Every structure is written in C-alpha cells, then in structure tokens.
Image (cartoon, rainbow, N blue to C red):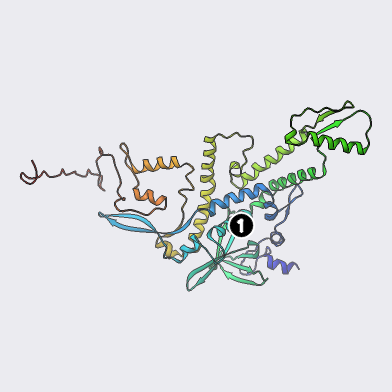
Amino acid sequence: MRGLFGALAGAERKDQGGSRYGLVDEMWADFFGGFRSSKSGVSVNWKTSLSNTTVLACCRVRADGHATVPWKLYQRTEMTKNGRTVVGRREARDHPLYDLLATAPNEWMTSLEFRETQSFHVDLVGRSYAFKNIVRGEIAEIILLDPGRVTKRVNADYSRVYTLQGLDGTTQTVTEDQIWEVKGPSWDTIDGLDIVRLAAEAIGLALATEESHAAFHRNGVRPSGMLSVEGTMNEAGLIRLAAWVRRNFGGANNTGRLMVVDRNATFSPMQMTGVDSQHIETRKFQVERICEVLRVMPIMIGFSGDKNATFASAEQMFLAHLVHCVRPIHRRFGGSADLHLLSKKERQQGFYTGFVDSDFLSPSVEAKAKYNQIALGGPNNPGWVTQNDVRGWDEMDAVDGADTLFVPSGMAALDETGKLVPITAPAKPAPGAGGK
C-alpha cells in the first residue's frame, strides 16, 4: 500500500536519475484535502480555511485585484522621428495569446474567472497549474487544473515532469513545456510555500473560537434579563407571565414603556461578562493575524478593529493595499506568463504581458488629474509625457499632433549633445509683399 500510494503521491526518495519527489505525508494530506491538525484541535486545510470568513474575504480581495484588471499582450516598438529613435508599444492583437489573456483562455471560462480561480490556488496551496494545449506550435487554449490532481517530479537537472489525473481517474504524464505553473513565495525555488500549512495555528485558532462561540449560542442560555416575583409560581403561571411580558413590552414598538407588575416583581438585565468580552477580543485578534499572513489590509475586508480611521487615513490604507498587495500580484503573474506563455524568441521581439492598472491604482480621481497636469508640463515646469501618453494610460486612442512635449516658453531647448538649439526669428515680409 505504501509503495502504491507513495508512487501516486510522490514519496520522498531518490531514483537512479536523481529525481526529487515530495514528502509522503504532504501527498497524503493533499489526497485527503490537505488536513493538518492544529494545536487548537481543529483540522486545517484549504477547504476548512475557506470556511473562515477572514480567509475567504482576504482571498476574494486578492483575487479581485488580480482578475478585475484587464490583462493584455503588448509589443515594444521602435520608430525614427527627427533622427531620434522613439520607443513605444502597441497592443499585439494579431498574436494568438492576446485573446486568451484578455477574453477567454478556453471555451468555458472567461479571463476573469480563470484568474480568480488561479489566484485562490496560489494563495491557498502555493501553486497553480494550467495545461497549454499547443496546436501547430501555438497555444490554442489554456486549461486550469486542480492542484490536487497534479503531481510534479523534479529531476536532477531541474527539468519537470507532471502527472495529471483526469476527472475520469485516468492519468497522463506531460513535460514542462505543456504546463504553466505559477508559484507563490518559495524557499527551494521548486514549490511555493503552503501558506495555509504555515499559518495553521492562526487559522485553526480562528476556526476553534468561531466553533466554540457558535456552540455557546446553540447550547447556552442567555436571556436579556430576569423577572422575579415573590412566592412560588407553577409552570402555567410562568408561561402566562412570560407571554404577557412579551406581548406588552417586547419588540421595538414597546421600547420605553413603563412596566407595572404585582407581587413585588423585579427585573434584572443581563450584562456581558468579562469572559464574553475577552472571547470577542480573541476573535478580533485572529482577524488581524490572518490579514497579516495574506498581506491584506484589514480595512479592505471591512474590519477596522479599534482603530478609528479618518477619511484621509482610509485613503492612504487603500493606496497601501494597491501598492503593497495588488501590484506584487500583478508582477508575479505577469512575469510567470512572460516566462511560460511566450517563447524566448517572442520576448526578444518585444512581446510582453501587461495589466491595465492605471484606473485601479488611482484611488483619487482628483489626484490622478493633478498628476496628469503636472506630467504634461506647465508655465513653471517642463513636461515629461505627451498627451498621447496620458490618453494611453486610460486606454484611449492616440490622436494626431499629440506626441509633442511641452516646456515653459522661457526655457531654451538642448540638443542631444547638451548644446543650445538656436532659435531662428521669423523672416520679415519684404516691402510691398503685404507688409507695411
């Protein structure tokens, strides 16, 4: 049994070719959903982690940052203008990969759906696999695979062989040129770190506190108050009294009404105990710990804790999220696509993938407009971009005559050698040629 499942799982051993396999316990964990018991007694894997609202919210925020931004294929271009080489770029719409990235990688998934699931795979299991269906030397479609159905073997020369398990249970072995693998942060450069496994204690404690809190409300008794009377009262009397109180003083419409009862009845409200308060604080603390692990600002999942964020500070938090969370995601997936979806020859020809994140990375329209105005140049400062550059940031078409840099009128122009460019005054019209 060990040999059979060890082979399927990729047992830790070396063959004569120097192949490297994964650990037996890791494969068994993947085979059964990746369960790992935490010190809190809760089994933690990607499935149970997603049942925690903080993990689910963080993964959705990260997936939205990756999937909701247009992803396109570009090619760098060079053109000679006034004796100088101008470097630009164009959308490579004629390349087969363009439509796969921008619209649909296969017949049943949109680009957004593909990248959304891809992001969940990388965040929760540390890796994402996609099969490249290559037809006549070109990628015809990209099929996202369940990481639990893929076994990777790394040989001594670092070449990779992948064994895929189909939905019908059949297996097929393919080479590395047919698989697009995206890794999360890695230690050995071979496999991405299993963030859920490394953060099992934080996630397990969050799951345990949520479970214990739910059990408390399911099994515990927590009335809003207690009404006591002198003497004894049978069950029928208690039921009638409770119904009378609920009918006359229950609900929002009866709030503030004066309660008048006989038999020296007294009402004692129930207050939250210190244990209850500490339990809630523990749950809040675990929210922050999980956000730290997944690199998501707590405010992005609607959690502010005890920090009273002002509008100005909230805007800076959103900007920090875009710069320190979303941008690294774009760089990770973009670099992986350039490496695995484009050939070396195509990269040398100037092809590369790019996220259109200009709007996404601009939390303030006013700040964006001010930056564009400064970049274009004004009376006291030279511009470093053209109007077509600014239009390109917003995915607008270029227009004629908008490729000129503007400088203040009181400044002199320099040529490529740093010398002043002479300014020739316009010739005066000859007498009798329309002049006075």
Can see residue 48?
A: yes
Residue 258, placed above or below residue 424: above
Q: Residues within 10 Å of mark 1 (few under 14, many from 20)?
A: many
Q: Quadrant of residue 35?
A: bottom right
Q: Quadrant of the N terminus?
A: bottom right
Q: Nearer the viewer, residue 270 or 374?
A: 270
Residue 113 in percent (x, y) is at: 57, 59
Can see residue 191?
A: no
Residue 312 in percent (x, y) is at: 52, 35
Tell me: 74 left or right of 169. left
Give the residue furthest to the bottom.
Answer: 136
Q: Quadrant of residue 182?
A: bottom right
Badge 1 is on which residue? 121
Residue 92 in percent (x, y) is at: 41, 62
Q: Nearer the viewer, residue 387 or 169?
A: 387
At label 1, the amino acid type is His
Q: Quadrant of the C terminus?
A: top left
Number of residue marks: 1
Residue 386 in percent (x, y) is at: 34, 48
Q: Residue at x 46, y 66 (%)?
A: 96
Q: Residue at x 7, y 45 (%)?
A: 430
Q: Nearer the viewer, residue 67 or 257?
A: 257
Tell me: 241 left or right of 391. right
Q: Residue at x 5, y 45 (%)?
A: 432
Tell me: 405 left or right of 240. left
Give SS at disc 1: helix
Q: Residue at x 68, y 51 (%)?
A: 49
Give the residue furthest to the left.
Answer: 432
